[in-house]
Image (tube, rainbow, N blue to C red):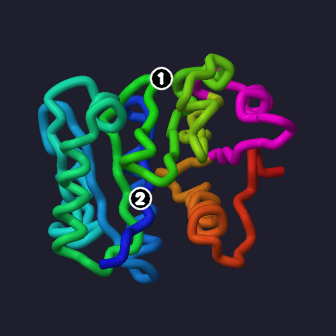
C-alpha cells in the first residue's frame, strides 16, 4: 500500500472550499488516484454536493460528521478523520492524493501535521479587503492561501490591490513569501495555479510554479 499525499482544505463557511475540491477533482482525476474526505458538523452536505456533481465516483468521497467544533476534528482530536483516511486507503491501496476538507471555521483554524502533509486556506473577497491583514494561522501559516471570489470585489468595495499587499505582508517570513493566489472558482480562474503548487511544491514535479498574488 502506498501512502497518499494528504492535503487539507480549510476556511470559513461559504468561502469556496467545496468548489475548490470539485475543480481539483475534475482536473486531476485523470492523472492521479484521488480520494476526498469532507467534514460537516451535523450533516453530510459537502459529501452530497461533491457526489451529486460527480466530482469523483461516490465510493471515493467519504463524509465525516464531527458533531462539534470543526477545528477540533482536524487539529486537537483528528481521530474521526484518521479513521476515514485509513478506511479509504484500505479500499483504494493505490491512492495517490487525498483531499481533506474541514468544516467551515474561522481564521484561527489549522490542520494537525499528523493528519495532513500540507494545507490550503480559502478565504473570500466578500468579507472585505480588511480580511488578509487580520492575520491568524489560516492566513499566515497555511502552505497555500487562496483568496476566492475576486468577481465580488466591485460589489463589496474591496480593493484587490490592498488585499494583495496585505496578504504578501502577512505571508512573508524571513524574506520568503509563502505562496498565495487569487481565484474565481465559479469560473475556474486560479485553479491552474493551485494545481501548479501541488505538482511543483508537494509532488516535486518539474513544472512551472503558481503565479503568486494578483496576475498582472
Which residue does the numbered mark 2 point to in the structure image?
Answer: 6
Q: CA distance from mark 2 to mark 1?
A: 21 Å
Magenta-drawn stretch contains 177? yes
Between 79 and 44, the residue placed more toward the observer is 79
**Is residue 3 positioned above or below 21 on the image?**
below
Which residue does the numbered mark 1 point to in the structure image?
Answer: 108
Q: Residues within 10 Å of mark 2 (few under 14, many from 20)?
A: many
Q: Position of residue 2 (x, y in %)?
A: 36, 77
**Bounds of the magenta span?**
155-182
Q: Residues within 10 Å of mark 1 (few under 14, many from 20)?
A: some
Q: Position of residue 11 (x, y in %)?
A: 44, 34
Give the mark count: 2
Q: Residue at x 56, y 48 (%)?
A: 184
Q: Residue at x 61, y 40 (%)?
A: 150
Helix, strand or loop for disc 1? loop
Sequence-wise first label, 2 or 1 = 2
Q: Position of residue 147 (x, y in %)?
A: 59, 39
Helix, strand or loop for disc 2? strand
Residue 53 falls in image quadrant: bottom left
Q: Residue at x 26, y 78 (%)?
A: 93
**Is residue 167 positioned above or below 183 on the image?**
above
Amino acid at each position: 500500500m502506498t501512502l497518499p499525499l494528504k492535503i487539507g482544505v480549510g476556511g470559513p463557511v461559504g468561502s469556496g472550499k467545496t468548489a475548490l475540491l470539485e475543480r481539483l477533482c475534475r482536473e486531476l482525476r485523470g492523472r492521479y488516484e484521488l480520494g476526498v474526505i469532507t467534514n460537516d458538523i451535523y450533516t453530510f452536505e459537502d459529501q452530497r454536493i461533491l457526489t451529486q456533481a460527480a466530482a469523483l465516483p461516490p465510493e471515493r468521497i467519504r463524509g465525516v460528521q464531527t458533531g462539534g467544533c470543526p477545528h477540533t476534528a482536524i487539529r486537537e482530536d483528528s481521530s474521526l478523520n484518521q479513521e476515514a483516511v485509513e478506511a479509504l486507503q484500505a479500499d483504494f491501496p493505490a491512492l495517490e492524493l487525498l483531499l481533506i476538507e474541514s468544516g467551515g471555521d474561522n481564521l484561527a483554524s489549522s490542520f494537525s501535521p499528523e493528519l495532513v502533509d500540507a494545507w490550503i486556506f480559502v478565504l473570500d473577497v466578500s468579507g472585505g479587503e480588511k480580511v488578509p491583514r487580520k492575520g491568524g494561522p489560516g492566513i499566515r501559516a497555511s502552505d497555500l492561501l487562496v483568496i476566492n471570489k475576486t468577481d465580488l470585489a466591485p460589489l463589496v468595495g474591496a480593493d484587490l490591490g490592498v488585499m494583495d499587499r496585505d496578504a504578501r505582508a502577512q505571508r512573508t517570513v524571513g524574506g520568503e513569501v509563502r505562496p498565495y493566489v487569487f481565484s474565481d472558482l465559479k469560473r475556474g480562474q486560479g485553479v491552474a495555479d493551485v494545481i501548479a503548487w501541488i505538482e511543483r511544491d508537494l509532488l516535486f514535479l518539474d513544472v512551472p510554479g503558481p503565479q503568486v498574488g494578483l496576475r498582472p
